[in-house]
Amino acid sequence: MTVEAVAALTTFQGRIIEIASSLREPEWNAPSASPGWQVRDIISHLAVGARALIDPLPLPDDAVQPPDNRERQHDMHVALRRSWTSAEVLEEFRSFAAQRLDRIPAFQKEPLASNEIEIPGLGTYPMHAVANALAFDYYCHLYHDICGPDGPIDRDLAEPTHDELYPIVQWMMWGLPQMQGPELDNALFAPLTLDLTGPGASTWTITRPDPEGGLVVTETGGGDVVVTSAASDFVSWGTHRSRWYHSCTVDGDQAAATAFCATLDIV
């Protein structure tokens, strides 16, 4: 089970509420580092996700059919809230995020923990991994899209600890074989090890045992190519928020490392 992910999720949720509660109106309306979204849109998006488990707000009857693309579906729900005040956006997130957080610990216990659920566009996971997915979403939006070096909001944020970052790395590794399909499968030319350092430190090796099959990820070393990166940097470049080569060193075939790392794009 991944009970540490619940603790990370709780921490990041508290930080988001603290930051959002401090925002002045111009900051709410500032362009975030997520293309096309203001800061308020990020909080709206997080509220939509929290509310989905409790009491989803339906799209209007005259709304166009939701697109297959998951990101564009997010856009439709965010657009529905553009006429809301910042206080209404924050209250929706605060209320439904708290209710969802009350339910998440049950996903860490059987019989729910091992039940598999499909997350449209992202793959199939055991229910205990939902906490990891949510912690990942919170961390990326808070530390990269709202604050951080690329976000518009200047606030002091606590540096994430190992116990906060490791569940995020786990989610990325569980999603890696599922989220991109043949695009990423065909970019692996040799067994490749990601050696992640600092908070969230861990070592993972990606292989393709069957040339006609998909990727396999194991928490071990031994790849022909070794890419070393701080785990916090991996979250950035592994989601295409930054260029991988600014943060990594390579031991082995540089071309093989480039092909894989430049293609990887976890969402």
Image (cartoon, grey):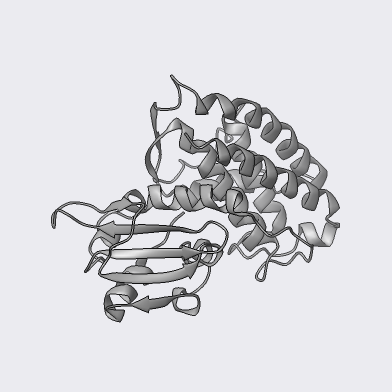
**As drawn, 52 above or below 235:** above
Number of labelled discs? 0
Q: Residue 140 sits in which quadrant?
A: bottom right
Q: Nearer the viewer, residue 173 or 143?
A: 173
**As drawn, 97 above or below 29:** above
The structure residue drawn at horizontal position 34% and vertical position 70%, both measured from the top left corner, is 226
User: What percent of the width, then of the height, locates residue 190?
Assistant: 22, 68
The structure residue drawn at horizontal position 43% and vertical position 46%, both measured from the top left corner, is 67
**As drawn, 130 above or below 178:** above
- Left or right of 194 on screen, residue 139: right
Q: Nearer the viewer, residue 33 or 140?
A: 140
**As drawn, 108 above or below 85:** above
User: What percent of the width, then of the height, locates residue 65?
Assistant: 45, 40
Res 40 seen here = yes
The structure residue drawn at horizontal position 40% and vertical position 27%, both measured from the top left corner, is 114
- Left or right of 261 on screen, residue 35: right
Res 83 seen here = no
The structure residue drawn at horizontal position 62% and vertical position 55%, both measured from the top left corner, is 141
User: What percent of the width, then of the height, locates residue 217?
Assistant: 31, 52
Q: Residue furthest top?
A: 111
Q: Residue 28 sits in which quadrant?
A: bottom right
User: What percent of the width, then of the height, locates residue 51?
Assistant: 62, 33
